[in-house]
Amino acid sequence: MGEGVLGMIIDSHCHTWAMWPYLPAVPDPENHGNVEQLIHQMDTNGVDKATIVCAQIFQNFNNNDYVAKALKKYPERLEQFADVDSMWSDTYHLPGAASRLEKAIERWPMKAFTHYVAAEDDGSWFNSTDGKDFFKVAEQSGLIASIALSPHHQSELRKVAERHPDLDILCHHMSGLRAHGNDARANLKSVIESSKLPNIFLKLSGFHYLTNAEWNFPYSDTHWVYKECYEAFGINMCWGSDFPVVKKSMTHLQSIQAFRIHCDFISESDKKSIIGGTLNRLLSKTRPVNK
């Protein structure tokens, strides 16, 4: 597969759904984002393994079950990051989060939990009594925390990372940074501050989110953000494709090449880590699962 010049390739951020959840509608909603499409793209483009970020949204409220079933079919290719209490759930930041995480661990072969934080939140839940209990369970259970959050949440996230040094935290899509706008520099500064914590990692993904154009490959207008984050985080970054959502902005192969070829400010040795080595190391530390 991806073994070679860059070593093992592991996708830190992709999704699979039984039914395409987003508008505009597609002509093949049962196939557009299913696991077979993901495996096909992985095979075609040399990706060895993918971590599936579950999202129990719109017609896919059993996405955790769907992904767990996919792991049984492709146990060597996929890992599950189960959706727990994300912002669209009925239990979002309600009391008892730690107990719900424990039940999720019992139910699904998860190496990590995924948690989407609402942009309007101030992040204080992270360090509430419930939040503290939740992250304590995650750390003690040997999970990775895969979190979708905005730059203004980083100060609260740093408290979590300091309190739980054995909990590795992956921030989705550069923690929501943008390459344009009046607050771009201030937000970047907030995220870079978190590079001082060795257990906070950035997913080097989402070029299509950082740009201000709908189709802009290779997204060179965003590279200044990636470059400054790389200078701060180094190999505490993990490449991700955002497949199949990325299809509206670039192909799966382009999501790889946007990093592999066009981020020429990253050394070749560090590219090996970012495209697979770092995430492989994190996964090797997680709880054993039976797929």
Image (cartoon, rainbow, N blue to C red):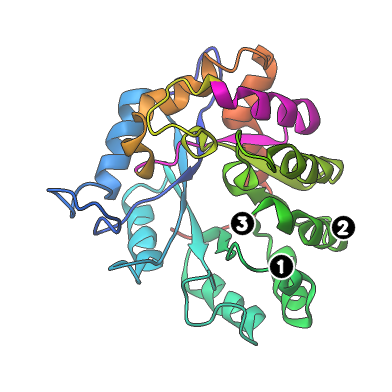
Q: Which residue is mark 3?
A: 147
Q: Which residue is mark 1?
A: 122
Q: Is residue 80 above or below residue 233?
A: below
The amino acid on which the numbered mark 3 sits, given as a three-letter code, is Ile
Mark 3 and mark 1: Cα distance apart in space: 15 Å
Q: Residue at x 12, y 48 (%)?
A: 27
Front residue of 16/191: it is 191
* Residue 56 quadrant: bottom left
> Which residue, as the protein is rendered here, is positioned at the far left?
27
Residue 46 seen anywhere in this rendered image of the structure: no
Q: Position of residue 126 (x, y in %)?
A: 74, 69
Q: Which residues are magenta?
A: 221-244
Apparent side of residue 72 relative to residue 167 in the rendered image (left or right): left
Of callouts 2 and 1, which one flags the residue occurring earlier in the amino acid sequence?
A: 1
Q: Position of residue 24 (x, y in %)?
A: 24, 51
* Residue 250 quadrant: top left
Q: Residue at x 74, y 64 (%)?
A: 139
Q: Which residue is mark 2?
A: 162
